[in-house]
Each structure stands twice: as structure tokens, then as C-alpha cells.
Image (tube, helix red, strand yellow):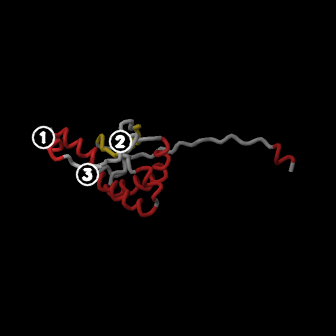
Amino acid sequence: MNSFLNREEKEVKEETVVVKTENLPQNHFTDTDLQMEWNLMLKQLQKRNGFIFNAIKAFKLIKSGENTIKVLYPSDSAKVEFDKIAGEFFNHFKTKVHNHAIAIDYQRDFDNLKIEVMTKRKMFEKFIEKNPLLKDLDDLMKFDLT
């Protein structure tokens, strides 16, 4: 038993797997295809695992190049939850669009850090920015937007 406890741990060698994509299909896909599959995945995830759904619902997936998808994430903890389902989603998407040369680019989205709750008052204020006459109407009618 002492020999087992005193044994030195072997070095762990990391191996990098390189997949050659020149022989794999590289069909064209659109941003609409990406958004449809992402929304479908979110709907399925909402039913299956609400915790992960709430963590990743603010993610934005954007097609940034012919074979590149940009993933904008609000926080590192949300990205950890996304990593749990990312393989499943991207494998499904690559198979669906017949493009196995898709590269994923993760970027932190500081603008989307918090999700704002839209109250009736906040929505009305945004409408006032678009149409200033609503302000006069609010002054005249004294709307109750609580």
C-alpha cells in the first residue's frame, strides 16, 4: 500500500485532435438557417432543462463569415452552461446544413450583460422617443402606466 501512495503520478500528455475539413461537405448556409435552428434548440431546452435555458437565452448567434459563427455571450458562467449543450447544437447544425467546416468564434457581449424587464412605463417611454406626440397625449389624458 505504501508503494501505491508513494508512487509518482505520471505526466498527462494532452493530445490535440486535428480534423481535416477539406474532404467534408461545405455547403452554404444563411443566418436565417442559424436563427431557426437556435430558436428551435431554445424551445426544446426550455422544456428539457430550464436552468440551462435561463442561462443561455440571452446568447446571440450570428453568421460572421462563410464558415464562421460568432457566439456573443453575456457572462463566463453562462458560457459554462452553454458549453454543456454546444457540442450537441453545433453537431446537429453542421449535419442539417451539410457544412462540417464551420468555425465557432466566442466573444463576450458586454452590451447584453443584463436583461432589462420591460414595464408598461418603459415601453411607453420608448414609444415617446419614436413619436413625441405621445408625450402630449400622456399630459392631456394622464395615463396610468403602473
Residue 59 visible within the image = yes
Q: Is residue 90 left or right of residue 119?
A: right
Q: Which mark is residue 48?
A: none
Identify which residue, 124 or 12, lies in the foreground.
124
User: Is 15 positioned to the left or the right of 102 in the image?
Assistant: right
The residue that disc 3 covers is: 32
The image shows residue 121, relative to residue 46, as above or below, that is above
Along the horizontal axis of the image, is 139 left or right of 83?
Answer: left
Callout 1: few (<14), some (14-19), or many (20+) C-alpha neighbours within 10 Å? few
Q: Of all residues shown, which one is farthest toward the right?
A: 2
Residue drawn where x is 45% and y is 41% of the image: 75
Q: Secondary structure at mark 2?
A: strand
Q: Is residue 29 left or right of residue 93?
A: left
Q: Nearer the viewer, mark 2 or mark 1?
A: 1
* Residue 133: image tag: 1
Q: Residue drawn 38% across and 41% down?
A: 72
Which sits earlier in the primary sequence, circle 1 or circle 3?
3
Mark 2 crowdedness (10 Å alpha carbons): few <14, some 14-19, many ≥20: some
Three-letter amino acid code at disc 1? Leu
Residue with the mark numbered 2: 70
Q: Indicate which label's residue lies in the foreground, 1 or 3.
A: 1
Residue 37 image point, x, y percent: 32, 56
Question: Disc 2 versus disc 1: distance between alpha carbons?
Answer: 40 Å
Which residue is pictured at 36% across the width and 57% down the height? 95
> Which residue sits at x=36%, y=36%?
111
The mark that comes first in sequence, 2 or 1, is 2
